Amino acid sequence: MYPLFESLCVQDGQLLNVPWHQDRFQKAYLHRYGQAPSFDLLEGLHIPPDFAQGKVKLRIRYNELESNFYFEHYRMQKIQRLRLVHTEALDYSYKYSEREPLEALFAQRGDCDDVLIVRKGMITDSSYANVVFFDGKNWWTPKEPLLRGTCRARLLAVGQIQQATLQPGDLKNFQGLKLINALRDMDQAMIPISALVY
């Protein structure tokens, strides 16, 4: 049983943004087990030749004592419409393997491609990515996301995005949005704000 995991991007055989994943791994391990990790996140990693070209998703699942690696070729899912779904009590502050509460919200998407989760009246994330909104000049991300993603943390650190407390009523102030995670960076097309379904 591996209760936690990390998803990393491997581009042409090179691991991307490793320090951000190591930082989150250390925090998640400490939160779960009450001590510093007993092993390194990348300990024993070897990228197989079949996954040394193109964009690859590396999933590292781990528990208190060990980890394992799973590789798959990555193809970015095209998101055209998102449905706002509401929840009062959802905790996904670390990358838990147990995702049933998120999957239950995703199941409410209807004819949309994904959901935009509103927790206690505040915009948070989609089912698998942080979200950033464009107001015509700046990019904004919810101050209290479900998960403090590694791409989000990196973009905040370099000042490419900013944080704001966002409610559904604020969405009309934006032109569009992007979904970001370890494998979806800012170099993707913007989704128009009109693609949100209430």
Image (spheres, rainbow, N blue to C red):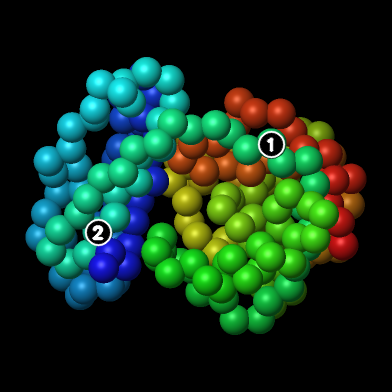
Which residue has dot 2 on it?
A: 62
- Between the C-alphas of marks 2 and 1, the distance is 29 Å
194 left or right of 79? right
Residue pictured at 65% horizontal, 28% vertical: 188
CA neighbours of label 1 inside 10 A, class few (<14), some (14 to 19), many (20+): few
Between 173 and 98, the residue placed more toward the observer is 98
Q: Quadrant of the N terminus?
A: bottom left
CA neighbours of label 2 inside 10 A, class few (<14), some (14 to 19), many (20+): many
Residue pictured at 46% horizontal, 40% vertical: 182
Residue pictured at 66% horizontal, 62% vertical: 106
107 left or right of 144? right
Q: Secondary structure at mark 2?
A: strand
Which residue has dot 1 on it?
A: 78
Residue type at the position of mark 1:
Lys
Q: Are marks 2 and 1 in contact (CB under 8 Å)?
A: no
> Horizontal and vertical percent for residue 147?
50, 60
> Horizontal and vertical percent for residue 26?
25, 57
Between 189 and 137, the residue placed more toward the observer is 189
Residue 46 position by quadrant: top left
Residue type at the position of mark 2:
Tyr
61 left or right of 196? left
> Horizontal and vertical percent for residue 154?
45, 40
Q: Closer to the N terminus: mark 2 or mark 1?
A: 2
